[in-house]
Image (spheres, coloured by chain):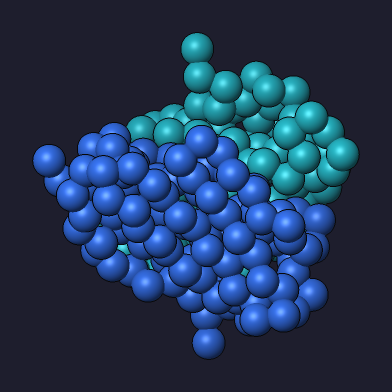
């Protein structure tokens, strides 16, 4: 079983829509959680860290449920520029990032 | 200028050839990493280094070796390339825990390697 599981999508949504991505992880000792964004053929870049209390950055909201080992990302008012692959990432020790396979989002006009 | 650079950006080679991929960074980070990305498999860690004298195997180190020539340079070698090493390779760096960008990894632009 892959340590970090995501629905690969693709999610096709119209501009202005709200879309949510989910992710589950298998290691209950995981320490840190992130969402990275990867544009086609480009390098991953940190979108936001995910905290136990939940956190928001503009149109993006991330939630963590440690009991269920579940992470979510909510994007409100989708923009064309949000089209990308979103990677759920879990850190188990002080360095090792475990990446999900990514969820593909396409925002259409 | 990019903080993390990789050379070459694209490489086509033949089975059995020795290949070196290079990574340089100007972020001043001690920690450096090599990943490969395959369609449908996500990113997987090959090797990582916490400082010039520290080298560690990652999830999929077989068939690869690395060299940390300096704090800023970390190279990945394929001693005898095989077709299933065809992939997109990323170098990444990170600050020490507790640093300003704690836990965030900064990736280079990637090297697309094809082994025929």
Going 66% across and 37% down the picture, which residue do you hit? Answer: B93
Location of residue B102 by image quarter: top right
Where does the image place residue A7, in percent across and percent down from the top left? Answer: 37, 72
Q: Which one is in front, B70 or B34?
A: B34
Q: Which one is in front, A24 or B47?
A: A24
Left or right placement of residue B21 versus residue A39 in this view: right
Where does the image place residue A38, in percent across and percent down from the top left? Answer: 40, 45
Where does the image place residue A63, in percent across and percent down from the top left? Answer: 60, 60
Which residue is situated farthest in the top direction here?
Answer: B1
* Image chain in cyan: B
Q: Is residue A59 visible?
A: yes
Q: Which one is in front, B85 or A75?
A: A75
Q: Is residue B43 above or below residue A81?
A: below
Left or right placement of residue B75 versus residue B37 in this view: right
Which residue is situated farthest in the bottom direction here?
Answer: A1
Q: Is residue B54 above or below residue B95?
A: below
Drawn colour of chain A? blue
Where does the image place residue B3, in percent across and percent down from the top left? Answer: 57, 22
Going 49% across and 45% down the picture, which residue do you hit? Answer: A60
Q: Is residue A65 above or below residue A68?
A: above
């Amino acid at each position: 079983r892959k340590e970090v599981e995501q629905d690969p999508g693709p999610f096709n949504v119209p501009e202005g829509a709200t879309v949510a991505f989910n992710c589950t992880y298998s290691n209950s000792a995981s320490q840190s959680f992130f969402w990275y964004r990867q544009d086609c053929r480009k390098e991953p870049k940190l979108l936001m860290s995910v905290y136990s209390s939940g956190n928001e950055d503009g149109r993006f909201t991330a939630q963590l449920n440690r009991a269920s080992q579940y992470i979510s990302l909510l994007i409100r008012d989708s923009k064309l520029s949000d089209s990308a692959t979103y990677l759920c990432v879990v850190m188990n020790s002080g360095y090792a990032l475990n990446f999900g396979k990514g969820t593909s989002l396409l925002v259409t006009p | 200028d990019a903080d993390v650079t990789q050379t070459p950006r694209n490489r086509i080679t033949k089975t059995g050839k020795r290949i070196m991929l290079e990574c340089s960074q100007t972020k001043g980070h001690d920690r450096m990493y090599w990943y490969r990305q395959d369609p449908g498999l996500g990113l997987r860690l090959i090797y990582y280094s916490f400082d010039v004298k520290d080298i560690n195997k990652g999830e999929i180190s077989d068939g690869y070796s690395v060299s940390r020539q300096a704090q800023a340079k970390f190279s990945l070698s394929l001693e005898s390339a095989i077709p299933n090493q065809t992939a997109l390779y990323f170098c990444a760096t990170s600050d020490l825990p507790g640093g300003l960008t704690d836990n965030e990894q900064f990736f280079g632009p990637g090297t697309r390697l094809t082994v025929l």
